[in-house]
Image (spheres, grey):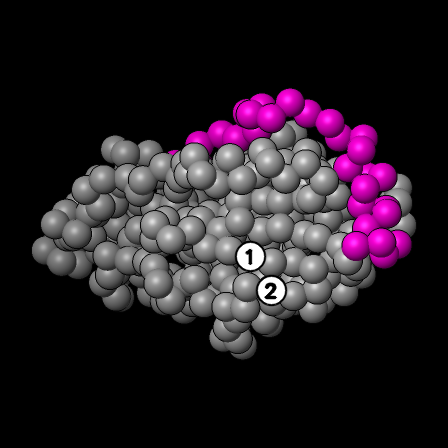
Amino acid sequence: MQQTSDSHLGAFLRARRAQLDPLECGLPETDSARKVTGLRREEVARLAAISVDYYTRLEQGRVRASAPVLTTLARALRLDDDQQKYLYELAGRTDARPRRRRPVQRVRPAMRRLLDQLNQTPALVLGKRLDILTWNPAATALYTDFSSLPPARRNYLHLLFTNPEVRNLHQDWEHDARDAVAALRMEAAADPDDPDLARLVGELTIRDTDFRTWWAEHRVNSAGYNTKRYRHPLVGDLTLDCDTWSSPDGSGQRLMVLTAETDSPSHDALRILTSWTAEEPGTDRTEDLAR
């Protein structure tokens, strides 16, 4: 009976990955022709942050999936509610199926008020997994137009590795990117079964060899301050102090603020940059992230 259930599970996994478009799943384009329709086994494994060998044995019915693995597979294969229910039933783990969605990330009112009062200082509110929940006009002027990005792509780490504009902005990109990976690795310890974390790690693992290497190092970093050097296309070089304050309510939200030493060239350049970004306080710049 178990063998029959496992074979049905493998058939479902194979059928589902064949239905997915690699580009829609965030996979890079390749010049070589694909020998299979949809996703390859190794691509599903990476998106789900599990080993290729484990996923292969799962498709072949030679191993029973744990509840956390089923959760990450459901996310990697983009299953709707009915498909998720079917997956758990085939795996014989209906009792372990998530009962509810994770709470929506909403910016705390106090964080929003602080942001509105920072007129000449780039500032971001970061949520779980370094998601960018909201920002002020100065942050847009420094980094990029966050409002033009899909909500699911408003993630600090994702932008560092996949957005050429943001990547080229950082003079010390490798240092800053490794610090961000270490910060995410530390956060992962608090919620290792987060399917959205697995999705983010899986996608970046496929797309970037540096991320894959640094994530495997298990380096962690919880420092709330450092110095960042930027090369902005409009105002030139900037050296900014980056300070991060955590919300005291346990929500995991952090206010990230970038400042320059008074009367320094960076201070003058930042003042020029932010003078072009006037906006009325209270303007809505966010969309809730149901993650």
Q: Secondary structure at mark 1?
A: strand
Q: Which amino acid type corresponds to the residue marked 2 in the rendered image?
A: Tyr
Q: Which amino acid type corresponds to the residue marked 1 in the rendered image?
A: Thr
Query: What number is the disc on residue 157?
Result: none
Q: Residue at x 79, y 54 (%)?
A: 262
Q: Residues within 10 Å of mark 1 (few under 14, many from 20)?
A: some
Drawn side of residue 211 relative to residue 145, left or right: left
Q: Percent x, y for residue 169?
A: 78, 52
Q: Quick one: 76 or 257, which is closer to the camera?
A: 257
Q: Residue at x 65, y 30 (%)?
A: 148
Q: Is residue 137 above or below residue 253?
A: above
Instruction: State the image quarter where residue 106 is shown.
Output: top left
Q: Residue at x 53, y 49 (%)?
A: 255
Q: Is residue 44 above or below residue 173?
A: above
Q: Secondary structure at mark 2?
A: strand
The magenta region covers: 262-290
Q: Is residue 13 magenta?
A: no
First in residue order: circle 2 vs circle 1: 2
Drawn side of residue 225 relative to residue 99, left or right: right
Mark 2 and 1 residues: CB-CB less than 8 Å, in contact? yes
Drawn side of residue 182 relative to residue 236, left or right: left
Question: Can residue 195 be seen by looking at this rendering?
Answer: no
